[in-house]
Image (cartoon, rainbow, N blue to C red):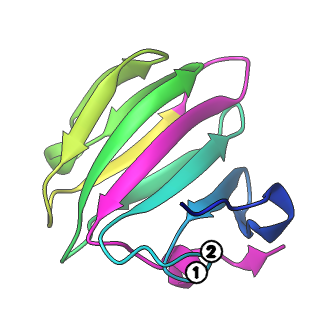
Amino acid sequence: MELIKKYDITVLCNPGVESAQLLTPENSRSEKVSVTKVSVMPGAEQPRHKHYTSEQVWVAVQGRGVLLLADDKEVPFEAGDVVRFAEKEIHGLRNMGPEIFEYICISTPPMNFAYAYMQAR
């Protein structure tokens, strides 16, 4: 059993986006998965991007947004929805609602997302 206390969780920040690193190889013994909670402020977005070695599952917890996919495709994504991205699949998110959009991201193999964020706290 492994318990990670909230004060041991690093939060990575970009303008309008925060990513709490809930379970990562940096704060646990996990070798197969990382779990983050991403909060996207109203009107903010995570630009389209891809991961070359990891598959991701996103579980929308709160709010209403739009998935930003390849070829400028956009798909509605809201609380209760689940989406899976294969490695190398282009994805991003824009918050379209008036409240914070939150989702849980599960990545396997685990990822260190520090490269994608400007600050950590």
Residue in view at x 14 percent, y 66 percent: 88
View extreme (front): residue: 1
Q: Which residues are magenta?
A: 95-121
- Three-letter code, disc 2: Tyr
Residue 114's disc is 1
Q: Secondary structure at mark 2?
A: loop
Q: Secondary structure at mark 1?
A: helix
Q: Could you say where residue 113 lies in the image, as x and y percent from the top left?
A: 50, 75
Residue 114 occupies which quadrant of the picture? bottom right
For mark 2, does the 10 Å Cα neighbourhood hold few (<14), some (14 to 19), or many (20 or more) residues? Answer: some
Residue 74 occupies which quadrant of the picture? top left
- Three-letter code, disc 1: Ala
Q: Could you say where residue 99 lies in the image, as x and y percent from the top left?
A: 73, 21
Q: Do the CB atoms of the residues marked 1 and 2 lie less than 8 Å apart? A: yes
Residue 95's disc is none
Q: Nearer the viewer, mark 1 or mark 2?
A: 1
